[in-house]
Image: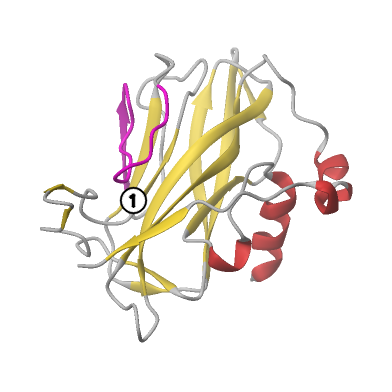
């Protein structure tokens, strides 16, 4: 189960520390050519052992006297070049597309004007660790470059149970500006990658 999480750490350049990850999306395989100028980008996610998927966990929260995180469990992949409208899909999750993306509180991700895709969990509460596959985005761009994601889940440890955790980092997306090295090359250089830690907790 954790093999995928380890692989995702190798495939992502700007990451949180993997042991403290919330929801960590990663491109599961190279893009699949569907023909007709369309390419399927298939993603998996890893949910760490101290987290849970909870569709209502943060409902009603406030932070510093103002709006806090959106309710529920979700992750957003930003700046999808060539996004094919209404093409995102995942069993047990709803998909939405926004200009700025559903984003946890206090994460500033610049808006490039490209579509951002959010997958929001709609099922029963699930405790990590768990790997989930089946997230798909279709694009008219077959190249791969580094983009950004953010995610939100709920802490499941005894002392922090019910608090909101969020995460942001890099993930492979459709694009042509900065081609991503081959997957094998990324794995070999994982020891040279500097990991950035970017997670905050807000109590309910």
Q: Is residue 109 above or below residue 177?
A: below
- Tell whether 37 sits left or right of 51: right
Q: Is residue 172 above or below residue 46?
A: above
Q: Residue at 39%, 20% (x, y): give it.
A: 111
Q: Which residue is mark 1?
A: 93
Q: Kindly give the residue lying farthest to the bottom in the view shown.
A: 158
- Tell whether 138 sits left or right of 180: left
Position in image of residue 33 (x %, y %): 66, 25
Q: Residue at 24%, 60% (x, y): give it.
A: 55
The answer to which image quadrant residue 117 occupies is top left
Q: Nearer the viewer, residue 201 or 11?
A: 201
Q: Kindly give the residue lying farthest to the front in the view shown.
A: 64
In the picture, which quadrant includes the N terminus? bottom right
Q: Residue at 19%, 62% (x, y): give it.
A: 56
Asked if the stretch drawn in magenta spans residue 139, the answer is no
In the picture, which quadrant includes the C terminus? bottom left
Position in image of residue 62 (x %, y %): 14, 55
Q: Nearer the viewer, residue 38 or 147?
A: 147
Asked if the stretch drawn in magenta spans residue 102, the answer is yes
- In the image, the segment drawn in magenta is 93-110
- Tell whether 81 sits left or right of 182: left
Helix, strand or loop at mark 1: strand
Judged by its main secondary structure, the magenta piece is loop
Q: Residue at 35%, 26% (x, y): give it.
A: 86
Q: Is residue 31 above or below residue 113?
A: below
Q: Nearer the viewer, residue 123 or 201?
A: 201
Position in image of residue 64 (x %, y %): 18, 52
Mark 1, Cα crowd under 10 Å, few <14 / some 14-19 / many 20+, is: some
Position in image of residue 147 (x %, y %): 57, 30
């Amino acid at each position: 189960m954790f093999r995928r999480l380890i692989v995702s750490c190798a495939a992502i350049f700007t990451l949180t520390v993997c042991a403290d990850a919330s929801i960590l999306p990663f491109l599961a395989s190279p893009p699949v050519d569907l023909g007709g100028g369309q390419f399927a980008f298939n993603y998996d996610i890893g949910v760490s052992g101290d987290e849970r998927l909870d569709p209502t966990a943060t409902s009603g929260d406030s932070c510093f006297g103002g709006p806090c995180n959106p309710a529920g469990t979700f992750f957003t992949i930003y700046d999808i070049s060539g996004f094919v409208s209404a093409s995102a899909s995942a069993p047990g999750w709803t998909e939405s597309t926004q200009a700025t993306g559903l984003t946890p509180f206090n994460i500033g991700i610049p808006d490039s004007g490209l579509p951002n895709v959010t997958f929001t969990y709609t099922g029963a509460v699930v405790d990590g660790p768990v790997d989930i596959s089946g997230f798909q985005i279709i694009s008219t761009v077959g190249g791969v470059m580094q983009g950004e994601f953010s995610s939100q889940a709920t802490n499941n440890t005894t002392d922090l149970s019910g608090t909101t955790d969020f995460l942001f980092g890099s993930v492979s997306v459709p694009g042509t500006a900065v081609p991503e090295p081959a997957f094998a090359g990324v794995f070999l250089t994982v020891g040279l990658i500097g990991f950035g830690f970017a997670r905050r907790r807000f109590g309910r």
